Image: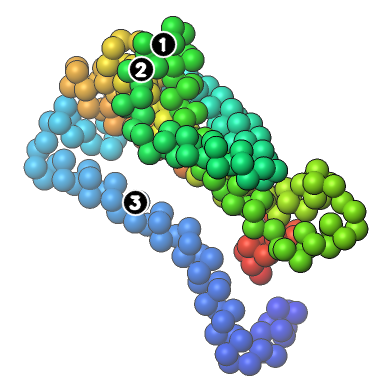
Amino acid sequence: MTAIEEHALTLDPEEARRVRQERLERIGRWLLPLAIMVLAIWLWDRICIWNDIPKYILPRPGVVLQTLFDDAGLLFSSLLVTLRITFLSLLLAVIGGVGLAVLFAQSKWVEMSFFPFAIVLQVTPIVAIFPLINIYVDNQTTKLLLCAWIVAFFPILSNTTLGLNSVDRNLRDMFRLNGASRWQQLRYLRLPAAMPYFLGGLKIAGGLSLIGAVVAEFVAGAQGQSSGLASRIIEAGYRLNAPRLFAALILISFTGILIFLVLSLISHLILRRWHESALKQER
């Protein structure tokens, strides 16, 4: 009898039921979405066959996959353009959002002065801002970068500001009693306490930066000024090339999923040894 079996025998029925439930949940977390995705793809294929739908209206999954391989050079080169805008805008959003949040934490007057303008940027649709950017900015890359940055900036700013302002008052009083300066409080207390909030905002901003880049490319692509994935979607739509359109959409979707998973992994690796949210995941 193995050690695991011996341990299982020593468990009471309630504990054994809980262990089985956790095991089923771990398996189901991956198996259920995969099964539903396979079923959805199968239904998609069957609908195309049963209704004899031409591929320029709704291509079969196999046709989309074949197009993804045949047009890989064109699509992946455009994906690199989109990814460059996405990651540059995310980097600038992190630098600007964290830097401004630190200023907000150090001075309530600065926060009251500038936070409303950040809200204005957040609530104004980027498609309404782009025509102004198109007038005042000459460089095409800068136009796209600025649009994607506007979309990704606010989640990092708001989450980091919330984290910096959510430090336990008793801990702040203890730091003051021990003669810590404001910058020492920021470095040793407030920034570590704000890390989970910042990482949560980073995961949101990662997806939004991709969305902002694609939306900006759509607006620019309609004017013939973009070479990213969005421009390939517009071009495929004009030519009724539905397989390429679907292939580009799949690339964007999987890119967004991959960005979220990578940022979630980074968040878990940073928080796993000390923050309650990550510790619970490891139980």
What residue sits right under mark 3 in the picture? 38
Q: CA distance from mark 3 to mark 1?
A: 48 Å
> For the residue marked with disc 2, what is the amino acid?
Leu
Horizontal side of residue 157 vs 174, given as left or right? left
Residue 58 placement: quadrant:
top left
| Closer to the camera in the image, 24 or 151 | 151
| Closer to the camera in the image, 267 or 130 | 130
| Closer to the camera in the image, 104 or 35 | 104
Q: Is residue 128 above or below residue 163?
A: above
Mark 3 or 1, which is nearer the eye? 1
Q: Are marks 3 and 2 in contact (CB under 8 Å)?
A: no
Quick one: label 1, few (<14), some, or many (20+) residues within 10 Å?
few
Q: How many marks?
A: 3
Quadrant of the frame with the N terminus: bottom right
**Relative image position of residue 86 (x, y in whole percent):** 50, 28
* Secondary element at image label 3: helix
* Secondary element at image label 1: helix
Q: Is residue 13 above or below residue 105?
A: below
Quadrant of the frame with the C terminus: bottom right
| Closer to the camera in the image, 40 or 170 | 170
Residue name at image x 19 percent, y 17 percent: 239
Q: CA distance from mark 2 to mark 1?
A: 6 Å
Q: Are marks 2 and 1 in contact (CB under 8 Å)?
A: yes
Quick one: label 2, few (<14), some, or many (20+) residues within 10 Å?
few
Most distant residue in the top direction: 138
> For the residue marked with disc 3, what is the amino acid?
Val
What residue sits right under mark 1 in the picture? 136
What residue sits right under mark 2 in the picture? 132
Residue 5 in sight from this viewpoint: yes
> For the residue marked with disc 1, what is the amino acid?
Tyr
Mark 3 or 2, which is nearer the eye? 2
